[in-house]
Structure formats: C-alpha cells, structure tokens
Image (tube, rainbow, N blue to C red):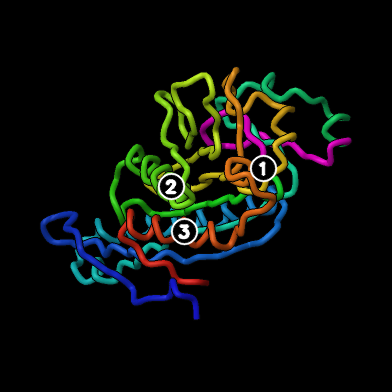
Amino acid sequence: MSKFRTLTKISFVPLHFTTFFLMNKTIQLQDLGLKDYKETWEYQEEIFKSVVDLKIQNRREETNLDPSVSEQAKQTPNHFLFVEHPHVYTLGKSGDLENLLLNEKQLEAKGATFYKINRGGDITYHGPGQIVGYPILDLENFFTDIHKYLRFLEESIILTLQEYGLECGRSEGETGVWLGAGTPFARKICAMGVRASRWVTMHGFALNVNVDLGYFDNIIPCGIRGKAVTSLNVELGVEKIDEAEVKAKILKHLAQLFEAEFVTK
C-alpha cells in the first residue's frame, strides 16, 4: 500500500448564510510514466473539464431555493499527474515563436516535436530525465489565490532541492526555481506554467533531474536571454539521481504546504 494513502481530510467553509461547500483535501495521484505530450495534454483537458463541469452543476444547485438540493452537492476532486515526456518543445499562449531556434526539419532530426499550448509562460523543453508534475486542483478546496498557488508549487521544489544540499530560490520578476538568482551565474532548474479557470488548475512544473541539457541549446528558455539552465545531477556532480526518491520528496512537501492527503489512483 502506498504510504500516501491516508484518510480523507474534509472541512466545511460557509458560502452563503444557508449553504456550505464541502472542501475536499484529498488529491488523487497518478504516475503516467513516459507518455506523449499531446496524449497527456488531452488527458489533462479531460480531467480539467470534468471538474469544471461539476463545479458549474454544483453552483446551479446552490441557487435552487430548495435547501435539500444544496446538501447533495458533490465534492470536486483533485488530481496530480506525474509524467515524463519524449523530447518536446512547448510554447505558452503569450510566448514568442522566435524563441524556438529550430525549423521543422531540424526538429525532426532531433527527434523532437513542438506544440503551442494554452498555458502561461513562454517556451520550454520537456524530455527524458525531467520530472513533470501536473496538478489539476480545485483551489476552492484549498484557497482562492493563484499567486499563492504558484508560490506553493515553487516552494515544494525549493524544499525538495534543499534536501539535496542545494541553495536555490526564486528570481525576482520570473517564475520557477533558480540557483544563483541575482548573480551572473543564475541558472534555472525548474520551469512553471499554469492555467486556471473557475479556480481549477492545470499544467504545472518541470524539474530537471537527469535531463540532457543539450536540448535547451535549441531554445531561449522561457524567453529569457542570458540565463542558463541546469539539472539536479549536474549540480550534484553525479551521473544519475533516483527520480522516484525526488518524486516522494516533492509529494511530501506539497502535502504539507496544501495540508492535503495524496491517494494513489
């Protein structure tokens, strides 16, 4: 049995004078292994839509004058996906295509694909050796503050990397997690980009653990010139890091920050 399987934690928050919203702090965990980016994106969208649709349904029931209806409102589920992608470059909706330094033929030669997607942020790379986490959470189960949400995602990575003895943190005006922020040697180790609608989130973070950093030479990462990219194994000077161990540490810190319980799906 997974050590993350625990009892559901539930609390109640008043929405109106006569109705209550059932907060669900359990997060269903799935590790998808190596999976195509487009397939994973579609799977995310499917889960995301189901949660948003349920919220819309619940809101309609809350406006019904029959008090018995509001008691039947369903909990909105929370999901967390771990995944590793084959070589792929993705561009956020506000990104600049010029930050991709390869043409179509060069992409094919690299064995990589390219997608323009509906998340925030600019261009980034995903590939083997990178831990990608996609939280699909109803933030009304936790808190309704998207900036706090992003800070918590960053903090979970910062705390994880500190367990490996790395000094890291945030870079002013930029998302993600950095080493040497504010110095000429600044380097990014974790990228982040999220989308949210009706307080439901999707997309998430990508932490470089054992990744081939050469693939970052083909882009201007996150559209930021003059900033390097690094990986956990490079910083520690080892050939390979146990990715399962890193995932366990991330989940531990996320559970503490969000006061949540992970249950393996």
Residue of label 1: 126
Classed neighbour count for the residue bearing mark 1: other residues with Cα under 10 Å, few (<14), some (14–19), many (≥20): many
Write down the quadrant of residue 43 in the picture. bottom right
Q: Position of residue 29 (x, y in %)?
A: 50, 65
**Earlier sequence position, callout 2 versus callout 1:** 1
Residue that numbered label 2 is attached to: 162
Residue at image point 45% right, 27% down? 181
Mark linked to residue 173: none
Q: Secondary structure at mark 1?
A: strand
Q: Secondary structure at mark 2?
A: helix
Please provide percent x and percent y for residue 248. 49, 62
Q: Looking at the image, which is closer to me, 244 or 239? A: 239
Q: Nearer the viewer, mark 2 or mark 1?
A: 2
Between 151 and 57, the residue placed more toward the observer is 151
SS label for mark 3: helix
Q: Are marks 2 and 3 in contact (CB under 8 Å)?
A: no
Q: Amino acid at mark 1?
A: His
- Residue at coordinates 30% horizontally, 60% vertically from top-left? 259
Q: CA distance from mark 1 to mark 3?
A: 21 Å
Q: Which tag, 1 or 3, sits closer to the chain's start? A: 1
Q: Is residue 167 visible?
A: yes
**Is 138 situated above or below 121?**
below
Tell me the distance, in whole angstroms, between the alpha carbons under discs 2 and 3: 11 Å
The residue that disc 3 covers is: 249
Looking at the picture, which amino acid does disc 2 mark?
Gln
Query: In this picture, is 169 found above or below 45?
Result: above
158 to 6, vertically: above or below: above
